[in-house]
Amino acid sequence: MKFSTTSSVRSASLATLLVASISVAASMPSAASDVASAATAGFVWTGGYVGLQVGHAWGDSYYDDGFGSFINYDPKGVIGGAYAGYNHQFGNLVIGAEADLNFSGIERGRAPEEYEGGGSSDVHYGTAEMKWNGAIRARLGYAVDRFLPYVAAGVAFAKYDIALMHDDFSHFERSTAVTGWTLGGGIEYAATDNLMVRAEYRYTDYGNETWDDENWGDGLNVDLKTHDLRLGIAYKF
């Protein structure tokens, strides 16, 4: 009788242990899933976006008349426009492509006393103005949850107009599309799951243009380089 009672207790204990083991085993996938979800929690940068930006730009633009005289235009002003792109995240690395187009208020006029150098030039006044600019760039960033420091580089293009006036009031004007390269970097922050803000610095070298003119001579040359500080806000899809 005593033996029978002990066996029953053991059987009950084994049954209880078996049920508990099955319960623990059944809960393990859920627990593992919760751990995995916690490990991968955070903002995901993958996706497309469109945004607006505004900034200030200043440039180095050197005009040379081919006779040893020159003007340092150094235009500056406000820029503003739109950008759009796509990011893909691999772990913490974020790779993307982006294009932007901006209206520009970068300009400068130079008076006669600011015309430098010797030579035989008799330029009376000079003006330079960038009408618009844009770029197509590749981006590489390192995501720290909602923060994304990044670098970007690509091809840049702009509409650049220059004008010169002789002391006899004859004019020389050129409006040209210039192309070059751009390099910069910044930091982006996801304020919400769909709203991203950024601050960026960009350096752009548009190269130089050379013209020959029957009235003004040959070898007229102007180059253009700009520095930009921009702020942007974008909507992520």
Image: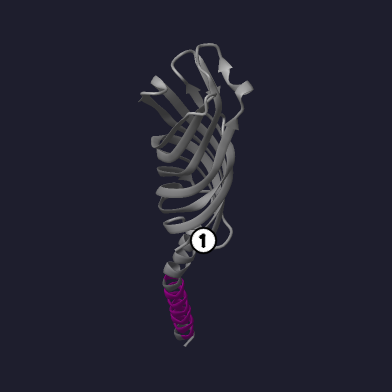
Q: Where is residue 28 in the image (x, y as percent from the top left)?
A: 44, 68
Give the percent coordinates (x, y) of residue 18. Answer: 43, 75
Q: How many marks?
A: 1
On the rendered structure, is 140 left or right of 107? left
* Location of residue 233 with respect to 31 vertically, above or below: above
The answer to which image quadrant residue 219 occupies is: top left
The residue sitting at the right extreme is 113
Q: Which of 1 and 10 is in front in this view?
A: 10
Residue assigned mark 1 = 38
Q: Is residue 57 visible?
A: no
Residue 216 position (above or below residue 46): above
Q: Give the range drawn in magenta.
A: 5-25
- Assign a secondary structure to mark 1: helix
Confirm whether the magenta stretch covers residue 17.
Answer: yes
Where 85 falls versus 170 (above or below)? below
- Image quadrant in which you'd find residue 228: top right
Kindly give the residue lying farthest to the bottom in the view shown.
Answer: 1
The chief SS type of the magenta part is: helix
Q: Which of 58 and 128 is in front in this view?
A: 128
Can residue 89 be found in the magenta stretch?
A: no
Q: Indicate left or right for 90 with 114 as reference.
A: left
Residue 110 appearing in the image: yes
Locate residue 62, reporting x and y percent: 51, 24
Q: How crowded is mark 1: few (under 14 residues within 10 Å), some or many (20 or more)?
A: few
The structure residue drawn at horizontal position 51% and vertical position 52%, both measured from the top left corner, is 81
The location of residue 187, given as percent across then percent down, is 55, 45
Does residue 34 lie above or below 206 as drawn?
below
150 or 227, nearer to the observer:
227
Q: Which colour scheme is used?
A: one colour
Q: Looking at the picture, tell me which residue is in the foreground, 23 or 10.
A: 23
The amino acid pointed to by label 1 is Ala
Say which quadrant the C terminus sits in: bottom left
